[in-house]
Image: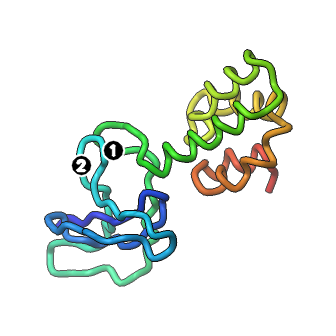
Amino acid sequence: MDYKQAICLNGHQANVDIDINESVDSFCTECGAKLITNCTNCNYPIEGDWSRSGDGFVDLTHHNVPIPKYCVKCGNPYPWTQSALNAINEMVNLSELDNNQKDDLKESVPDLLSDTPKSKLAVFKWKNIGKSILPYIRDILVEVASESIVRALYGK
């Protein structure tokens, strides 16, 4: 049996083992935002707990089901990822950097959220061009960026 998870539009995980055919019509207990179980772009289910098998056995060990950033079916960012991207880009726009520097940083933001071949270049750009903004986006990046990116930008 397949399971999907319910996550609010702001990225708070509510449930990781909802039957694939079940619908959810509720809201987040942390922030009040609507819960979704499917991609808002292609309607593909947000993959849930894989440890529950259909063969009559249930794995009782604890599994941390990650909150995905992008849909596995269409590749689009989930609403919480898009919100993080938008917030970082808005902070860049509000900075005192020149337009070329702003464009350079905004272009590199997606490479901060996932480990890509261009992630090291993105870290380099942010440590050099965007260093004045880095303290303000730390909390956003801790929530959505990979651990290695956060370490590279902030240490530890």
Q: Quadrant of residue 125?
A: top right
Dot 1 corresponds to which residue? 72
Instruction: Name the residue: 48% across, 52% down.
Output: 80
Q: Return the residue nearer the eye: 116 or 41.
A: 41
Residue 138 drawn above or below residue 6: above
Q: As drawn, is 75 to the left or to the right of 73? A: right
Mark 2 in CB contact with mark 1 (< 8 angstroms): yes
**Amino acid type at mark 2:** Tyr
Q: Quadrant of residue 74?
A: top left
Q: As drawn, is 129 to the left or to the right of 116? A: right
Residue 53 drawn above or below residue 86: below
Dot 2 corresponds to which residue? 44
Residue at the extreme top of the image, as rendered: 100
**Amino acid type at mark 1:** Val
Q: Return the residue nearer the eye: 69 or 52.
A: 69
Q: As drawn, is 114 to the left or to the right of 78? A: right
